[in-house]
């Protein structure tokens, strides 16, 4: 009986952890975070501002730096200083970056 209860509790905790891991970022919150990026990046057109348009970013094969478009590489770009882009490593929290990436995936 105890073993059965322990197994059920463990299975429940594991499933909750999986659900939490799958929902990493909130696109609605990411859209708010993106407002700081909007002066330099378009999302409504392919037109370039100071930085490249981010419209359809996760549908592209490569970033401007030639790297494959992945969550990890986009996060690295956010964290790193670019040609004209400041780094946001210490400006945005990890959750804000998760939210921003979730928003960029909707474009």
Image (cartoon, grey):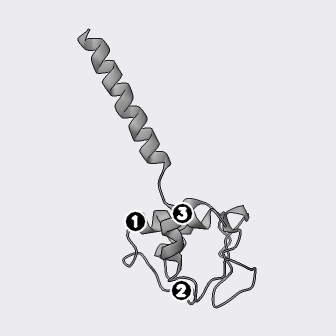
Which callout, 1 or 3, points at the residue further toward the start of the chain? 3
Whether residue 104 is visible, yes or no, is yes
Q: Residue at x 36, y 77 (%)?
A: 90
| 53 relative to 21, above or below | below
Which callout, 3 or 2, points at the residue further toward the start of the chain? 3
| 37 relative to 66, above or below | below
Q: How far apart are marks 1 and 3 (CA)?
A: 14 Å
What residue is disc 1 on?
94
Number of numbered discs visible in the structure rendering: 3
SS for callout 2: loop
Q: Which of marks 3 and 2 is in front?
A: 3
x and y percent of residue 55 in the render?
Answer: 70, 73
Q: Residue at x 42, y 33 (%)?
A: 15
What residue is disc 3 on?
27
x and y percent of residue 101 in the render?
Answer: 54, 65
Asked if the residue at tag 2 contacts the one at tag 1, i.e. Cβ–Cβ closer than 8 Å, the answer is no
What residue is disc 2 on?
85
SS for callout 1: helix
Q: Nearer the viewer, mark 1 or mark 2?
A: 1
x and y percent of residue 52 in the render?
Answer: 67, 82
Between 67 and 33, the one nearer to me in the picture: 33
Neighbor class of circle 2 (other Cα within 10 Å; few <14, some 14-19, many 20+) is: some
Q: How far apart are marks 1 and 2 (CA)?
A: 18 Å
For the C terminus, the image quarter is bottom right
x and y percent of residue 73 in the render?
Answer: 56, 65
Asked if the residue at tag 3 contacts the one at tag 1, i.e. Cβ–Cβ closer than 8 Å, the answer is no
SS for callout 3: helix
In the rendered structure, the answer to whether residue 104 lies left or right of residue 20 reads right
Neighbor class of circle 1 (other Cα within 10 Å; few <14, some 14-19, many 20+) is: few
Residue reaching furthest to the top: 1
Q: Nearer the viewer, mark 1 or mark 3?
A: 3
């Amino acid at each position: 009986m105890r073993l059965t209860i322990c197994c059920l509790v463990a299975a429940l905790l594991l499933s909750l952890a999986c659900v939490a891991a799958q929902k990493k970022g909130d696109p609605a919150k990411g859209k708010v975070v993106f407002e700081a990026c909007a002066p330099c990046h378009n999302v409504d057109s392919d037109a370039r501002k100071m930085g490249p348009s981010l419209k359809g970013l996760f549908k592209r094969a490569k970033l401007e730096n030639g790297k494959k478009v992945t969550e990890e590489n986009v996060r690295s770009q956010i964290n790193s200083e670019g040609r004209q882009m400041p780094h946001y490593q210490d400006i945005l929290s990890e959750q804000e970056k998760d939210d921003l990436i979730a928003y960029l995936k909707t474009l």
